Image (tube, rainbow, N blue to C red):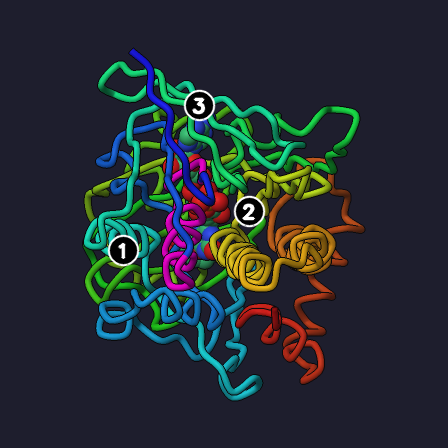
Amino acid sequence: MSRELKTTVAIIGAGPAGLLLSQLLHQSGIASVIVERTSKQRVLERIRAGILERGTVEGMEEAGCAERLHAECIPHDGVILSFDGESFEIPVKAITGHNVIVYGQTEITKDLVEACEARGQQIFWDCPDAAISDVDSDAPKVHFTAPSGEAVTLTAEIIGGCDGFHGVSRQAIPAERRRAFERTYPFGWLGILVDQPPVAHNVIYANHEDGFALASMRSETRSRYYVQSAPGETVDDWSTERFWQAFTHRLGTLGQQVKTGEPIEKSIAPLRSYVSEPMRFGRLFLAGDSAHIVPPTGAKGLNLAFADVRRLSRAIAHWKSSGSDAALEGYSLDALARVWKIERFSWYLTTMMHQFPEHSGFEKRMQRAEFDYIRSSEAGQSTIAENYVGLPF
Ligand code: RFL
Ligand code: PHB
């Protein structure tokens, strides 16, 4: 059994990038079809990002999906930095005039899936074998087996490669036409979700000689906490007791107020910085984690994915309405200029806030000096604040 389908934009991946792209294109009257590797349930269950920039909120507004976000989000007007138990708060709102908000990626995904389904968007869930061809022609194709067993050929005018770091889109750019830039960090983050009120009203980033710790939240009654873990460690190496001991100790005096409990989720993620250039080849356009990864320090991954998608949807809409290729041709260079600034901030905060096994006393003194400088300098705090709320796009 085989089937031929046609659409304007074929989107690979129903993560936040793919779903937002489809929704924004729809707002401009442009049709798309989404092909997703895994099940809808798995996509809806994934727990990841929690902190959203203003530009990400604007993306949800443009998509017509911001109603619940506005009703339920928790605005944050600052961010707390801690070093060996001493802490201070950077008043982000007072410095920049803007907030970040807490609204989980899980909720973003749910809102976008619901909006897509409500208007009858075609999404093929459970298609693990998507393959791309003809990207350097004006009729690029995605081939996949639908859950019904049918072999589908989806012919489009444009392919949106939104299939994350492990997807197929980036690989569809010939190896000799792309270049990867990468740094892996010698540690991971062990994250837990617990039904207890958050330890502070804003996010805490803590550097401690035992390792990094981060206190975030999902609601007034649900906290999201992380600790730096050693390479190769798994969740089995981290009993609940070990987690709470490490977490509370690394937060110093703030740790005394932590309310512990049985985690409802526990997972480990490696940390890496990665950029693949270019983000376009022929009629294939990469957006989000398919083109770049940032370490989670600074909470930029989802926000960066949304910035790419807003840029791409505008370029596609401009191309459709004007017939001019200029915006599509500019996409990769324009997006990468911003990507590298976000990579820089995420790398900087990661380097400043973690314990690196290879660091000598010199680097540790540098971290301490950086912390003291920021604490005492309006200019230093402004730099962190303007990056944390999100650079213009
Ligand atoms: P995703 O979310 O990985 O979605 C890609 C989708 O593509 C599907 N897919 C395929 N579909 C079809 N065919 C294939 N061959 C496919 N291969 C893959 C996948 O199943 C999936 O559904 O990428 P996208 O959409 O670009 O979104 C990126 C964000 O998910 C990511 O950057 C953030 O989660 C990063 N991140 C954070 N970002 C923030 O902005 N703020 C945060 O606070 C934040 N915290 C985090 C994070 C990421 C974390 N982990 C686990 C990596 C905290 C953590 C712990
Ligand atoms: C989160 O809430 O999951 C979170 C917050 C801040 C980060 C990363 C993740 O830098």
Q: Helix, strand or loop at disc 1?
A: helix
Percent of width and height locating residue 56: 45, 65
**The disc labelled 3 sits on which kind of residue?**
Ala
187 sits left or right of 203 in the view: right
Q: Are marks 2 and 3 in contact (CB under 8 Å)?
A: no
Q: Residues within 10 Å of mark 3 (few under 14, many from 20)?
A: many
The CA distance from mark 2 to mark 1 is: 20 Å
Q: Amino acid at mark 2?
A: Ala
Which of the pair 162/318 is nearer the observer? 318
Q: Quadrant of ligand 2?
A: bottom left
Nearer to us of marks 3 and 1 is 3
Counting residues from the N terminus, which is met first, the one under dot 2 or under dot 1? Answer: 1
Q: Is mark 2 within 8 Å of ligand 1?
A: yes
Classify residue 390 as left or right of residue 8. right
Residue 213 location in percent, x, y? 47, 52
Q: Is residue 213 left or right of residue 311?
A: left
Find disc 3 in the rendering and name its residue.
130
Eye-nearest disc, 2 or 1? 2
Residue 389 higher or lower than 165, as above or below = below
What is the spatial separation of the Cα atoms under label 2 and label 3, in whole angstroms?
Answer: 17 Å
Q: Quadrant of the N terminus?
A: top left
Mark 1 lies on residue? 107
Q: Are marks 3 and 1 in contact (CB under 8 Å)?
A: no
Report whether the residue tagged 3 is closer than 8 Å to ligand 1.
yes
Which residue is outermost to the front? Answer: 323
- Please give the range of residues in magenta: 11-29
Instruction: Give the farthest residue toward the top.
Output: 1
Q: Which residue is mark 2?
A: 287
Q: CA distance from mark 3 to mark 1?
A: 26 Å
Membership of 142 in magenta stretch: no
Name the N-terminal-most of marks 2 and 3: 3
Residue 330 occupies quadrant: bottom right
